[in-house]
Image: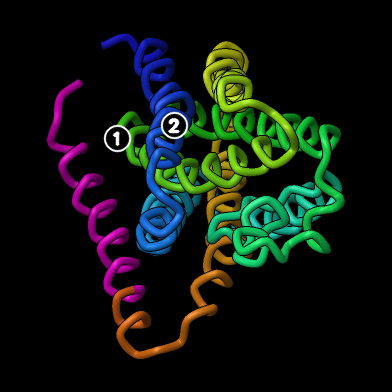
Amino acid sequence: MNLLVLIIIFTAIGGVLSVMAAAVFLLLSDEQRNKVLPHGISFAIGALLAVAFWGLIPQAFEEVKPEQFQSLSGTILAGVLGFFVLEKLLIWRHCHYGECEAYSEEANHGHGHSHSHGIAKSSGSLIILGDSIHNFVDGVLITAAFLTDVHLGIVTSLAVAAHEIPQEVGDFAILLHSGYSQKKALFYNILSSLATVLGGVLAYFSLADLYDSLPYFLALAASSFIYIAVADLIPSLHKKTDMKTSLEQIALIAAGVLLICVLHGIAHDIEL
């Protein structure tokens, strides 16, 4: 199959389909949503870290000479710090576990005014802008993975989709709380998700001429996944510390890692 077609398909999977899944997820009651979402977060953590450490980083180091190892490691470090700065500048919190102004437990019980007074139309616009930039970068990273290895591109796009679903749920909740109707919130989320496809297509035509830079884009992809998993997702798991929940979290993280490893192995056996 043509590589560009594959990139379009899998960037769409990582973008538009995750928004649609989030929209369906929001049809659940608050009680059902609060039960299911933490499990999805744990699974996404395993998937993200597995792709970063099992696929992206080893592949990046295979593509460079030993004297470039330090600069490649520096790229991963700079990427983690860069995503932190970007998140700060854009007030870019994903609300993965409902701990935000738009979706806090206090707000659900009518006591969240002190937390939600700052959310307005401008905040909704900022979420859309931040999400569009994030999705565009995701598209570039997916394409970088595809241009290095088709199998790596597939598992990378699946990992993107895994973390996009809880993110889009949080973004959707913020837009609704900011005064957007359900139709408008869904429309703007879909519109911002198309930036993933745009980023992927533009990267295809530009990165192909910059093949020597691909390892550094893979390193940037790894740093993005590591940052999202460690900074945004893992802290939410510490809100419950009982033994049963902790064991469930560990099991689901392991399942996410195992799935990516299995998919990575299967992908290498498939002729596309």
Position in image of residue 211 (x %, y %): 55, 26
Picture layout, residue 91 above or below residue 175? below
Amino acid beneath label 2: Gly
Q: Main secondary structure of the magenta part?
A: helix
Picture layout, residue 2 above or below residue 73? above
| Mark 1, secondary structure of its residue | helix
What residue sits 74% from the left and 48% below the top?
92
| Mark 2, secondary structure of its residue | helix
Picture layout, residue 176 above or below residue 111? above
Residue 264 highlighted magenta (yes or no): yes
Amino acid beneath label 1: His
The span shown in magenta is 249-272
Which residue corresponds to mark 2? 14
Asked which quadrant contains residue 255, the reply is: bottom left
Position in image of residue 205 (x %, y %): 57, 11
Position in image of residue 64 (x %, y %): 53, 45
Picture layout, residue 188 above or below residue 79? above
The CA span between labels 2 and 1 is 15 Å
Q: Quadrant of the C terminus?
A: top left
Which residue corresponds to mark 1? 151
The answer to whether residue 254 of the structure is visible from this angle is yes
Asked which quadrant contains residue 22, the reply is: top left
The answer to whether residue 58 of the structure is visible from this angle is no
Marks 2, 1: nearer the viewer: 2
Position in image of residue 250 (x %, y %): 33, 76
**Mark found first going from the N terminus, 2 or 1:** 2
Viewer-closest of 117 and 74: 117
For label 2, count other residues whose C-alpha is less than 10 Å away and answer few (under 14), some (14-19) or many (20+). many
What residue sits 40% from the left and 38% below the top?
27
What residue sits 74% from the left and 38% below the top?
178
